Image: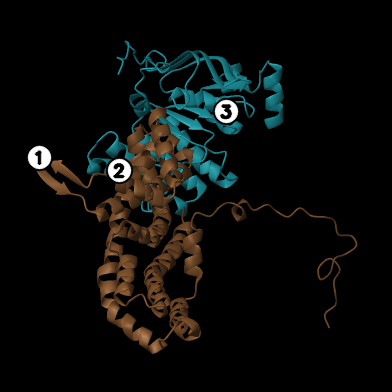
Amino acid sequence: MARDIPGIAAPARTDLPVLKPFRPGSFAPDSMAWSRWLAGLPPWTPLALLAVAFAWPTVAVAQTDMSAGEAWGILVRWIPFIVGSGFVFTVLISILSMLIGTLLGAMLGLAQISKNGLVRRFAWSVTQLFRNSPWLVILYIVLLALPFEVVIFGAVLAIPDWVKAVFGLSLPIMANISEIVRGAVQSVPTAQWEASESLAFSRRQTLWQIILPQCFKRMIPPWMNWYAILTMATPLCSLLGVEETITLTRQALEAENNRPALLVPFYGFALILFFAYCYPIARWTISLERKFAVKL
Amino acid sequence: MTPNSGWTPDQPIISLRNVHKSFGELEVLKGVTFDVMKGEVVCIIGPSGSGKSTLIRCINALNDIQEGSIQVEGQEVHDAHLDKLELRKKVGMVFQQYNLFPHKTALQNIMMAPVKVLKEPKEEVEKRARALMAKVRLQGKEDAYPGELSGGQQQRVAIARSLAMRPDVMLFDEVTAALDPETVKEVLVTIKDLAAEGMTCILVTHEMGFAREVADHIYFTDRGVIVEHGPPATFFTEASDPRTKEFLSQIL
């Protein structure tokens, strides 16, 4: 039997209270927490979800007149509609919002590090406003504030709701991308600015030739993190009547007379769709983050 | 850009008059005056916190000054309308922490400023950059990234990077302070070669032996003023100020 060593295996009488080292990282909020959590889930999670969704009608006997097999049969009939029209549209909305949000966010982020104090403060306020407002509120404001049609050179151009939704979702993304850009630029040591300034680089040249190329890679994982979060947020558009995954799922359920036994399988399927799309992105994001963390 | 106000090479290339510099309440330079002639090598020594680094950072306008005058080739640096970029094309600077661009190879580090700032043709700059790599004895390391080079090698690339702009004056800010003793020598040899070629150099340094060997003139600063100065032959042996004597006795 191993001997107990006082002070190692058990407290010793000579032990003094010790202040353990402080690790700031363990208390700081982690902006990538969401992707980290998702990427940490085992790959069989969707199968487990699927099993639960279909076990539901059988388990909840009181409210059902349907077997798991029947429910599955009905869902399979609707899958081409839900995926083919709904989820494809979800992906389209998320990509367009991300594109617009990234473009605007990059500009706003650069404005946040402008030499002009007024520009800097304005960009900061806009960033904070859209970063800290509820997405749904932003969506509603955009929906109601934008006209439903515009007249350009006499031609009447209708603005469909989904375009407004894309714009509305791109605003919080813009604000968060703005913070990513600002943070990345400020993470480059000031010595790099001084070195390039003393080589007669102008501020603009320094930013574009020296600073941004160094921190570009560092921006990719948080940027992907926000893409996955955005995708998860697209069902908000269903409240505006945009025909994405959730709206079509609801339409399918209505066509099946809203039978209670179908609710959990149908919405469970939607959940799995989102999971299947975002899970690989999260895994990829976290692996990229690890890869880029090595070389600074 | 302001015209050169009739500066000729027989006048001081750098001329400081009563330079005052404060960071908020803290006054770091309290009236510094000196001249540097073309081709001269000047060493600034002194205890930590005496304002040495701040002093040379004011010369290429990395720091601004509150009072006094700094002229480089007759052009006033303490001027709100100063074209800093034109000034910095003439004044090269090397830092303690090398500050190479980590995402570029050694050769690209050297080529960047002449190509992007001076808009010189790439082929010509590359030829010059390769010659500079040879000059700082780093042939074969052209394609290495800074992270793959030792401190001494990085510092020599930093010197070559500055020289590629063909400056008239070089500022060295404690360039060997971050290096280990073996690599200090290779950097000092490089600077000595430069001095021998007639480059005007201002060095902030703690290397007394080196200062004695290459400097034409040594300035001792303490608490924001120049306490004592002179050519190395007399400076180290005939210091009269008690602060200089104390400093030298601690170091030599």
Instruction: Give the residue pinned by disc 1.
Output: A153
The hue of chain B in the figure is cyan
Horizontally, residue A158 falls left or right of residue A164, namely left
Q: From the viewer's perspective, is residue A262 above or below residue A150?
A: below
Q: Which residue in the protein does label 3 denote?
A: B212
The chain under label 2 reads A
Tell me the mark number nearer the camera, choosing from 1 and 2.
Answer: 2
Say which chain tag 3 marks.
B
Q: Quadrant of the C terminus of chain B?
A: top right
Q: Is residue B110 left or right of residue B49?
A: left
Residue A142 image position (x, y, % from top left): 32, 46
Residue on which the image places disc 2: A145
How crowded pointer 1 is (Cα within 10 Å; few <14, some 14-19, many 20+) is rated as few
Q: Position of residue B16 (x, y in %)?
A: 48, 15
Q: Position of residue A214 (x, y in %)?
A: 40, 48
Q: Residue at x 32, y 72 (%)?
A: A254
